[in-house]
Image (spheres, helix red, strand yellow):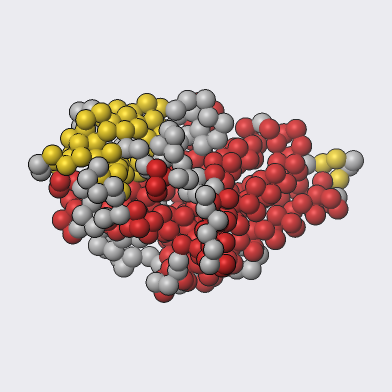
Amino acid sequence: MTATHPEAPLSDGLTADFYGYENLLPEDERKLLLQARDFLRTEVKPLVNDAWAKGEFPRELIGRFRGLGLAGVPYEGYGDPLPAGSNLLVGMLSMEYTRTDASSATFFGVHNGLAMYSIYRGGDQEQRDRWLPAMAALDKIGAFAMTEPLGGSDVAGGMRTTARRAGDHWILNGAKRWIGNGTFADLVIVWARDEADDKVKGFVVERGTPGFSAAKIENKTAFRIVENADLTLTEVRVPEANRLQRVDSFRDVAEILRATRSGVAWQALGVMIGAYELALAYAKERRQFGRPIARFQLVQDLLVKSLGNITASWGMLVQLARLQDAGIFRDEHSSLAKAFVTARMREVVAWSREIFGGNGIVLDYDVARFFADAEAIYSFEGTREMNTLIVGKAITGESAFV
């Protein structure tokens, strides 16, 4: 891998890494992590507050991420001459992106995770070779369209978007909602229910296909940089060659979601770390009653509780990455991590914002952005309640789903 951005020194660790988890990475992978850290600090952070306030995705970020050269890390042979990175590296990179800004990092996560992994896992070799190199180079941007206007947690059995076979094409009809990158993606992975066998199948819909339209969702209070879209599909003709050939049912889709759900837990860790670091720095600088507020017991209590949540969550995610690398992790493993870590994230961003007092609601101090964006991470890729029931079924053997 050749990166245009200079390497950061190996000593450039995080104050939030109290137990030294980054040291578990081999030196070559840690160099990539620190390279990303330096890039995000200098190239991305200066853009985010203005973009967040405007509610617009800064398109120049695509070129900047292209210069970073890390889009192909999880996929050996596609845009990355090195062997595919470990799941620990991939997770820590996700944490690092989100530590700077959750909503701009989601652009990268949707593209590099949901969209690319759908093709990598669900496509045949020809489809991988057709799309993944350009996606790894960020020459083509991907999106992932599953959630629907009237369907969320029940999408497995209640998907309303349909696919009908017509010779060597498929006809798609329906609507999707909350689709990240949906307004500008070159390739959208659309999931639809086959009218013939009632099974969910995946299709790569290319931008400009007749009958396909995307409208940006406005007035969001979280993830304002992400251009979520409402998608409409009206008699959209997609060639059989664009149907993901290795997806035959929702069970195959669930394997994709299992991997990406663990990535959301890493994102939640990044939000915690970003908010905690801001609060710690502010506590050292802000003076009340003639001394830094970091000297007050109640402020230290909030900081230590935040650090405890971060350290516990990081340890859980390290073991989850090991299970992934060993090929033995299951749905309930990623569901427990997503439910637990996002709940801890909610606590940390609230405590961090509290330390800022009134300044905590002003975008200039950054922490308000983390506080707001945490709500989106808490909700997507399965709510806490749904992930809890997945784990509950695994440990009791009894399904509590309605």
Q: Position of residue 149 (x, y in %)?
A: 43, 33
Viewed as shown, does residue 387 lie left or right of 31? right
Please state which of residues 292 and 9 is positioned toward the viewer in this rendering.
Answer: 292
Q: Position of residue 199 (x, y in %)?
A: 29, 50
Residue reaching furthest to the left: 167
Determine the residue positioned at 29% across, 44% down.
193
Quarter of the rendering containing residue 226: top left
Quarter of the figure that contains the N terminus: bottom left
Q: Position of residue 188 (x, y in %)?
A: 29, 40
One can see residue 101 in this view: no
Q: Is residue 267 above or below residue 146?
A: below
Q: Is residue 234 above or below residue 18?
A: above
Quarter of the rendering containing residue 253: bottom left
Residue reaching furthest to the right: 289
Quarter of the rendering containing residue 79: bottom left
Please state which of residues 391 and 67 is positioned toward the viewer in this rendering.
Answer: 391
One can see residue 254 in this view: yes
Viewed as shown, does residue 295 lie left or right of 16? right
Please state which of residues 118 and 365 is positioned toward the viewer in this rendering.
Answer: 118
Determine the residue positioned at 13% across, 39% down.
166
Determine the residue positioned at 39% across, 30% down.
230
Q: Position of residue 258 (x, y in %)?
A: 43, 58
Determine the residue positioned at 16% across, 42% down.
165
Please state which of residues 115 and 50 is positioned toward the viewer in this rendering.
Answer: 115
Q: Is residue 36 above or below residue 357?
A: below
Q: How many numbered marks are there?
A: 0
